[in-house]
Image (cartoon, rainbow, N blue to C red):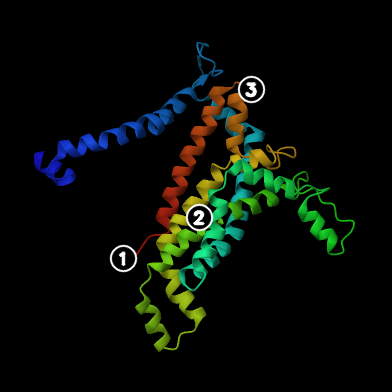
Amino acid sequence: MTKLMTKGFGKKPLVTILFLFPAVFLYLIILIWPIFQSAGYSLFEYSGIMNDTKKFIGLDNYIKMFTDPYFKRDMLNVLKLTAISFIVHIPLAFGLGLIVSRGKRGSNLFKTIFFIPTILPTAAVSLMWKFLYNPNWGAINSIVRALGFTSFNLDWLGNRMSAMYAVSLVNAWVSSGESMIIFAAGMTGIPSELYEAASIDGATGLKRLTHITIPLLRETFRTYFILLITGALKSFNLIFVMTQGGPNGATEVPTMMVYFNGFRYYNYGYASAVAFFILILGFLISYIVNKLIKTESM
């Protein structure tokens, strides 16, 4: 036992444990305990108000969730958001990462410009784009009308057909900086000797991209896919500020269902069931992606 502790924690295991204890304690209190607490509340009929009585109902909240048409609609909205994110994010993030990783003059400025949306407050970004999408005096419709389409007056966020696409494009813009850094870091880690050898063999830029860059970014793609899918599952702030789930639920996602049931309708047990399901689904998706995209040792 002593040898095992020495191997895992170094020559002074007690000192190491004491240094790790504050971080581990905060992790358990802030993250792990609320997960178990949420799982427990999901088995009760509970309003969330202190000192209010809890009625044990077992799995009734989960049964209600899987038969709830609003939950099915919100899950379909998440699938749509994820699909749009894949179509828009992947070429955008990969292309930006490719440009930045080359390290040419001005790449640092380029990196800074595209990373700015990531560090801006989500509420401020959402309000800015809400103004840009305004059908009457928003910049987007004004530009389209200035190009000659004088009668163009699309209500981007008020139309069921366009609302999710409009929100997804903003989401892609906001997360483009973070995605760019992920791909740029992966590309920088590829040995330059491989590209030099490919150039000697007469490989063109496209062949180098498909035979060297993309195959060697397997680990990066795996991380990116997990972040992309789980990010869509837990998306809330941007959509809530821009549309609050409207029009008529066209952009509502399960996290908003958690918010509405927990803090507006005081159905805390049902909200906990939906939240716990989102957590488990996120873990399952991460596990599946890790199994599907296995990293081969080089």
Residue 297, numbered label: 1
- Closer to us: 112 or 163: 112
Q: With respect to residue 262, does 51 lie above or below?
A: above
User: Quadrant of the image for the N terminus?
Assistant: top left
Q: Secondary structure at mark 3?
A: loop
Q: With respect to residue 4, does 145 lie above or below?
A: below
The kind of residue on which mark 1 rests is Ser
| x 14%, y 46%: residue | 7
Residue 235 coordinates in the image, percent (x, y): 57, 43
Q: Single out the mark in the foreground, 2 or 3.
A: 2
The residue wearing badge 2 is: 178
Residue 265, numbered label: 3
Asked which quadrant contains residue 77, the reply is top right
Task: State the separation of the CA atoms marked 1 and 2.
Answer: 26 Å
Mark 1 nearby-residue class (10 Å; few <14, some 14–19, many ≥20): few
Q: With respect to residue 129, does 188 lie above or below?
A: below
Q: Single out the mark in the foreground, 3 or 1.
A: 3
Residue 58 coordinates in the image, percent (x, y): 49, 22
First-in-chain label (1 vs 2): 2
- Closer to us: 113 or 188: 113
First-in-chain label (2 vs 3): 2
User: Quadrant of the image for the C terminus?
Assistant: bottom left
Mark 2 nearby-residue class (10 Å; few <14, some 14–19, many ≥20): some
| x 40%, y 55%: residue | 291
Q: Secondary structure at mark 1?
A: loop
Mark 3 nearby-residue class (10 Å; few <14, some 14–19, many ≥20): few
Q: Secondary structure at mark 2?
A: helix
First-in-chain label (3 vs 1): 3
Q: From the viewer's perspective, is 172 left or right of 214?
A: right
Query: Is there a contact, CB below 8 Å, between mark 2 and mark 3?
Result: no
Task: State the separation of the CA atoms marked 3 and 1.
Answer: 52 Å
